[in-house]
Structure formats: C-alpha cells, structure tokens
Image (spheres, rainbow, N blue to C red):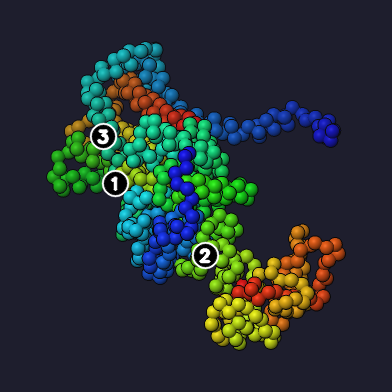
Amino acid sequence: MTSVAVEARRPRRSAPAKSLAFVRRHLLTLWSVLFFGYLVLPIAVVAVFSFNAPKGRFNFQWEHFTFSNWTHWNAIPGIQSAVQLSLEIAVIASILATALGTLMALALVRYGFRGRGTTNFVVFLPLSTPEIVLGASLLTLFLNFSTPLGFKTILIAHVMFCVSFAVVTVKARLVGFDRHLEEAAMDLGANEWTTFQKVTLPLIAPAILAALLLCFAISIDDFVVTYFVAGSRVTFPIFVWGAARVATPPQINVIGIAFFVIAVTAMLGNVFVQNYRAKQA
Amino acid sequence: MTVEAAHPPPAVAAAEYDIRLIGLTKRFGDDVVAVDDISLDIDRGHFFALLGPSGCGKTTTLRMIGGFEEPTEGRIELGGVDVAPLPPYKRDVNTVFQSYALFPHLSIFENVAFGLRRRGVKGSQLRTRVIESLELVGLAGLEKRKPRQLSGGQQQRIALARALVNRPRVLLLDEPLGALDLKLRKEMQLELKRIQHEVGITFVHVTHDQEEAMTMADRIVIMNGGHIEQLGTPTELYESPRTAFVAGFLGVSNLLEGTAVAEDRVKLADGTEVRCPREVLGGRSGTVQIGVRPEKLRIGEGAGNTLSGTVTESAYIGVSTQYILDTPAGPVTVYMQNDRPGGQVATGERLTLSWSPESTFVVDTQEGTQ
C-alpha cells in the first residue's frame, strides 16, 4: 500500500531530464560497447578486406567482393611454405612449452627447494623483457655457440618465451588444489604415478589445455624474436613483413583471419566445455 | 552389506592388537615436537578415539598411521608388522578425511570404486561391492551423481563408504564430523557407531569434541602437548581422571588443593579433612589436588565429606540449576536438580555440600589447572 502511494507521488520529469537519466543508467554499457569496438574494429577491417579484389598490389581500397582470395589462398609464391612452417613451429613449441611449464609449475607449487624464489623470478622475466631484447640476446647466444640459424633456433626461442605463460597458467590452478585429494588416492591404493594420472592430471587438465592454446596463439604470430633467430627460414609473420614492403596481397588477410578464427574457436570451445562440465558436476 | 565379522567381545580381543605404536615421535624442523614418544596399543575391533585440544598431536599421530607423515622416530605396527617406512598405498588402512577429499571429477560410483579398481576388482564383483557399500551408508541410488551435487552429510557418508569398501584392517577418521551441523553430527555419531558394529573393523577416530568421543568410543586416549595424558574407557576417564588436564578437559571438575595427611585423607587449605579411597590417593604425599564432579555433590549434611560456602552465582539451566559456591578451600560448582518448586537458593545464602568418599578423585598438582 505504502509503495503504491509513493509511486503516485513521484513527480513527472521533463524529457531532457529523462534522457539524461537514460544516459546515466547506460553509461557503462555505452563505454563497454565503445571499448569493444575499439578492440574488434581492426580485426573486422582485416576480415572484410580478405574478401576484396584490389586493383593494384596494395589491398587498402575497397573494390568489390570476391571469394577468390579464400579459394586461392596459396596463390602467392612462398606463402604456403611460410604458413606451414609457422604451424609446425607453433604446434611443436606449444606442446613442448606446456609439458615443460606444467612440470615446472608442479615443482614450484609443491616443493620447497633451494632456488625456488629465483626460479619464480626467472620464469617471469621473459614476460616482462622487451621482445627486441630477447631476440637480440638469443641471436648473440646462438652466434656464440655457432648454432646454425633455422628451424631449431626458432623452436628453441618459441619454447623459451612460451614456457613462462604455461607456468603461470598451470600454477594458478595448482595453488587452489586440495592436496588431500592426492592423499586420498594414495590411501586407496594408488601409487604416485597412478595418483598423477587418475587424480592430479584430470583436475589440472583445463589449465593445461588453456596453456596449450595460449602458447599456440603466442607462437604463431611472433615476429620480433623469430626475425632475429630465423636465419633464412620464413614464418608467416616474417612473410607478411617482407611482402608488405612491395605489396599487401589479400591472401595475407585470409591467413590472418583463418588463424584468428581457429584460435578463438578453440578457446571458446575450451571455455564452453569447461562450463558444461562444471554444470554437470 | 553382509556382516563380515561380529563385534569381538573385548575379553577375547584384548590379546590381539591391530595397531601398536612404539615410541612414536614426530618433529617438524628442529624445535617443534608435534608427537612426543607415544606408545599405544589399539585392540582389534575397537572404536578408539584420539581426543585432545587442537595442536595436541592427535591428527599428526593419525597421519603417521595413515602414512602421510613420516615418523621421526618409533615404530607403527599394523597386525605385528612395522609399516612406518611404507607409503600409504602399501598399508592396510583407509582414511576418512576431514574435508572428505572426494574426487570431484569422478561420479559417486567411481569414487567408491577407486580403491577396488586399484586392486584389480572388476565387473559384477566391483559393482556388487560398491552398491553394498553405498547401502551400508544408506545412499544407494546416488552412484551416478557427482560429489558436488550432494549435501555435506551425504558427502561424509560417501567418504565413509569409499574407505570401508576396501575392508581395511583399520579405518582412520580425521574429525569426520567437524564440518556438519549439530543435529547431523549427533545423527552421524550414532550412524558411525552402528556401522562400526556392523563391519567390526577397528576405528581410530580423531576429535577435539569430548562429548563425541564419550558417545562413540570404547576407548579414549586423551592427548595434550604431543603426549598421552590418559587412556581408558569413557567411564574410567570421567570417574577417575589421573591428571588435572583430563579432569578439566572431560566435563566439569571441582579441583581443590590440599595435603595428603594419611593413606586415605587429604587436608584442604581451610583445614577440612576429605576422605577418599586409598587406591585413589595411591600413596601420594605432599601437595595434591582432590577433585569431585559437580553432579556428585549433594546439598546438606550427609555421610562422607562435607564443605560449606556462600553462593556467589547461580545459573538456571532448565533441568537443573548451576551454583558456584565460594568455600574456604576454593570455588566449587554444583548442579542441583530442579525437582521441587521454589527450591531455588538465593545468592549470598550459605550452603553445606556433601559427597561420598568414593566420588573423590585425586590428581597431581600442576601448572595451568582449571
């Protein structure tokens, strides 16, 4: 009764006041939309221009719509081998880095050992060091050891900077891990290896998968470090950089968007599966 | 679940130890002694409680039996074999953890089947045993659920089923009822007791709740500061505590300081002489403390020991009234049944209390008594 009375007594507001209130109420939404636009607009432009049929060598002006860039994605000499190399490096590097990173995270969270603090610090170093410094110092290292530059050096470099991301991702999951679960497994007759397989691994699997996807995404688009250590090998980012000086074929957009879609789909898939599982449980 | 072994009568079981701890010690670092030279025999088929305040070493003792902590010194014998150097998975014990530690990624069925699968039990035998075990704890039909879909009480039962399905020699329970609310806890106390009788396995139950230990256990060991204060049946511990700590930890006690003046007589501070059984005084001389439980005190003159004092506080508890008397020998608590109308005693009134010498116990004087 009282609430109805209050409602009735509320004064009618003028139109400008109303719109002001509307803006005030939706300010956060508006801000979010603007910010999101700022993030995706460049990607959207790249996507749209992957369907362009440019007149000259540069794909900067919209001419007309075509699918031919997608159907003839490897029509540019060298692009196919560059994509292939990037994929090979990314797959191998992310698997190696995630495996290493998972083991490192386990050691860092579980055991107190001499040099743990230092290791924790060193793991963070590649995350905070400028890539150009990383690349230059790696190159110096390889030259000093007279390592021939190529596939191996690119792989080593990628594993190095991916490992940190893997460690950080898996560590976050392990910190909240109930150690009693492993004790319970051993109490029920599982030895160390079975305990790891049946209890530890399934429980940290989402973090491992996330680390894998993250490493893949970081590896496949790395340019700066790769450029230093690649020697004569050409990865996709290096190819783009080289090509951009004389031309920007729309195939570059095609490959870029394809990578982007694959990465985002995999990540969304991971999130979706995790949420579904969480709901099931 | 079929009854596998009848609850063995204590007289027969007395010769048979399931667990034997010999000089068990656990130090953390250089100066923290969690468990200090404990020796203990636990009879087969008993419900045994390790009782003590937090930090007394009871959980560490249990974890050493389970294999999760390595003893610094001493032996842990399970059925006569020293298991101290063995990992948990090579010991014939199972644990119910305080946090239950159910595997969140496995169904209830797989949780309970975990131990059996490790031993290679398969197919219909596996299924039968898991279902039997779930029936034992009254939760058959939930095997397809995940642990998170169950209530705290149900999770507790699943943890119990998961441990019992392996038919271990000994079941270790680490404050298993700590996370449950009062009503559920009372229910589970009786339930645990029933299950223990049904399966006849030795239970070692760690708790800080004295009432819980008294209700459930056949035998209780009271621990304090890493060592054993006293071991006995609930009645023994309550009726004749041997230390001031036990007297204070298990229920309410009136402890009064005095001097042993004869084989069965103690003179209190105000000169009152108190009689007690000879074996209770046990040949002590010098300063001792005599104790008597509040419910053993009668109001008015009577046979045996008497003491008078002024009522300083009274608290009405419904079924009885608690009075605190100031006597020349020290403060004394007494419970009086509210069985007559208008029977209340006012603050400031003088009362005379009496109790029988048989209800008197004696403990050594020590620091920090209550």
Please name which of the two marks, 3 or 1, marks the residue nearer to the observer: 3
Residue at image point 36% right, 60% down: B76
Residue at image point 25% right, 30% down: A88
Q: Mark 3 lies on which chain?
A: A
Pointer 3 and pointer 1 on the same chain: yes
Tag 3 residue: A92
- Quarter holding the N terminus of chain A? top right
Q: Mark 2 lies on which chain?
A: B
Q: Which dot marks residue A255?
A: none
Where residue A208 sits, quadrant-wise, is top left
Q: Which dot marks residue A133?
A: 1
Q: Is residue A94 left or right of residue B343?
A: left
- Give the mark, 3 or 1, whose residue is nearer the N terminus: 3
Image coordinates of residue B88 in percent, x first then y, are 36, 51
Where residue A271 sits, quadrant-wise, is top left
Q: How many labels does the image show?
A: 3
Q: Disc 2 to disc 3, how far (Cα)?
A: 65 Å
- Name the element at disc 3: helix
Q: How crowded is mark 1: few (under 14 residues within 10 Å), some or many (20 or more)?
A: few
Tag 2 residue: B232
Q: What amino acid type is highlighted by mark number 3?
A: Ile
Q: Disc 1 to disc 2, how far (Cα)?
A: 72 Å
Q: What amino acid type is highlighted by mark number 2?
A: Gly
Q: Can you see residue B60? A: no
Q: Which of B242 and A268 is in front in this view?
A: B242
